[in-house]
Image (tube, rainbow, N blue to C red):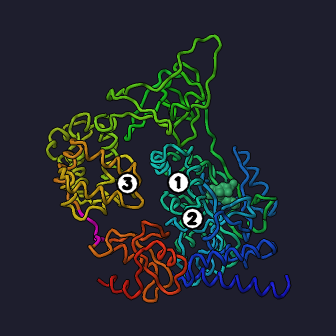
Amino acid sequence: MTSNQEKKTKDIIDKINYHNDLYYNKDKPEISDAEYDRLIAEFKKIQKNFPSLSDDDNPLMIIGGKSSDEFTKFNHPTRMLSLDNAMTKEDIENFIKKIIRFLSLKDINIPFSIEPKIDGLSVNLVYENGQLTVAATRGDGLNGEIITSNVSTIKEIPQKLKVKSPPKKLEIRGEIFITKKDFLDLNERSKNQFANPRNAAAGSLRQLDVKITASRPLKFIAHGFGIYDEGKKTYYDQMKEFKTWGIPISPYLKVANDIDDLLNNYNYINDKRSEIPYDIDGLVYKVNDTLYQSRLGTVGKTPRWAIAHKFASETAKTSIKKIDIQIGRTGSVTPVARLESINIGGVLVSNATLHNFEEIEKKDIREGDTVVIERAGDVIPHILNVVLDKNKKRSKLFKPPKNCPVCGSSIIIDPDEVVVRCSGTYICEAQIVGRLKHFVSRSALDIEGLGDKQINLFYNKKIIKNYGDIFKLEKNRIQIVNMEGWGELSFKNLVEAINDKRKIELSKFIYSIGIRFIGEKNAQIIAQAFKSTDIFTRFYNNDQDVKKDIFNILENTDGLGPKAIESFKEYSDYKDNRNQILSLIEEVNLVISSLKIVKSPITGKKIIFTGTLNSMSRAEAKSMAEKLGAKVVSSINKSTDILIAGEKSGSKLKKANELGIEIMNEESWRKLSLL
Ligand code: IVH
């Protein structure tokens, strides 16, 4: 680079860093988006000419590629290692022997840390002076991709470390994953697009649209760190210290002092695997002493001081007695294989999931077939393959039923969906029971002591037929206390747990009802359309004016798709549903959260901010606008109602003028926001 070019490059980098800081950290941009984009384009040109430009000088490495339409490469400050696998006790013995030999130790019992090996995606989080500056995928261990903005949507990952004097630079490594339960819910919503939780986490994380990542239930657990000189003497103590800084670590992290201790823990966790909320495929053992770790060093990509002790997935042969159909809460029809019971690794298996009809066809699975079943510990056993016997006549191919085996309604096969569904949404008992289970489940009302088992029991005894019945359980006291496994005390506890949940926030109420396509986010959006619980009651009293108003609002609300609106409408058009809701409302104390929107001149309007506001930050302005009932949008088009132009407004102001959109200056906005 000539000195002139060098100066120009440095100037642009400084400029971008300055504007990044204003935009990302101070919420006070001074230039328009278009101007910023031009700067980035200029920088990219220079970057191409000078590939030697170090990552430390690269402003795109520091922030989450705001301008880029693809993920920027990131050079990990220290290599992200992978692990060798051990399958048997002998493998572990050899691993330890080598370490003892390498370090010339006399004592053969050296302490190891133990953690589950989470089946997710590893990330590198770079903290500079306690602030998260870069999050990157593992890539090949040397180079990953920057996913800072995506990772910043994960609540569990601190943006700032909770420590007075943070290290200048710290790399935290860990796993991003989705829990087994969240995976099932997500797949239900997203038409079974993901094969497993890992796949779902990967698909959710690597999204150019950060909003999609933000809507996914991603979790994080740290399992290591890059070079950190000021660190503690042991891995265990170091991780515990990170925990106090706000970094999530494994709740199963332990230290084992000898090989027996390691193996006992392995067996213990293997047995407990089904209770762990996320998929794990083994344990990771690490030499606990960090000085030993650095003496041991690495061989290629793997450290000498750590190993993954994998769990065996076990298989067994058996035959399919029958293929049954299960109907889920949203009518999904799932085929299940009823098996000749078989013991697989100490667990009696009599059912295997067949996922969907495509799977049956692909693997050509038929009733009466001999099949190989795999049980990978924590997941529902599934069929690996069919073992064909030429001498045996096979039954016919299993096809989806024409009618629901529970309610007789017709089955809908949507060519866009893998899942086939029962059309008897509100009459099908399987769906009714599914919705009742959802209503009391953890993510909904979360009634302790009222789970799937109790709902099945009370539904079969006709004690709970609809949501309202749950709150009228007292009526059935005599019947229940005399049932097997029940008594006065357990009944009293259950009634108390139910009474504890009588106060329900409107959005939670809407979500808990279990309407298809109305998840937590959509329920929140819908709840905002109701200005009072009285209006909500009138809506379910079938007041046509109220209904018209509400659907008018919903149709003009961003973020709510037509399918969700249609489903919400279909639900309220059905008289039985309305009656159920009305009787439920009588039993509970419905509240609208204090964040209630006030009526203002901008209620229901779409507004956009541009330029610099002197009197408040963008974040504050946005939250004020939302409190006044406006929707803040980020791109301008015909449907935008008002543009609030601060100083140095650029292309958006021009476009607003072209489109004839109302323009407000900061002074008028300030007056309005003080209303
Ligand atoms: S330690 C020595 N600990 O497994 C440093 N890795 O093949 C290597 N993983 O890429 C990582 N849980 O993504 C470590 N408790 C854990 C882990 C874990 C999952 C993943 C990680 C890594 C891969 C190793």
Q: Quadrant of the C terminus?
A: bottom left
Question: Could you say whether the residue bearing mark 2 is in a helix, strand or loop?
Answer: helix
Residue 159's place in the image compared with 464, above or below, is below
Q: Quadrant of the N terminus?
A: bottom right
Q: Residue at x 36, y 26 (%)?
A: 405
Q: Nearer the viewer, residue 102 or 141?
A: 141
Q: Which amino acid type is marked by label 2?
A: Asn
In the picture, the disc for residue 178 is 1
The part of the chain drawn in magenta is 591-597
Gap between marks 2 and 1 measured at Cα: 15 Å
Q: Nearer the viewer, residue 281 or 625?
A: 625
Q: Is 485 colored magenta in this rendering?
A: no
Q: How dense is the environment of label 2, judged by Cα within 10 Å: few (below 14), some, or many (20 and up)?
A: many
Q: Position of residue 140 (x, y in %)?
A: 74, 58
Q: Quarter containing ligand 1?
A: bottom right
Would you say the residues marked 1 and 3 are in contact, meaning their CB atoms lie under 8 Å apart?
A: no
- Prevailing secondary structure class for the magenta stretch in the rendered image: loop
Left or right position of 426 against 246: left
Residue linked to disc 2: 150
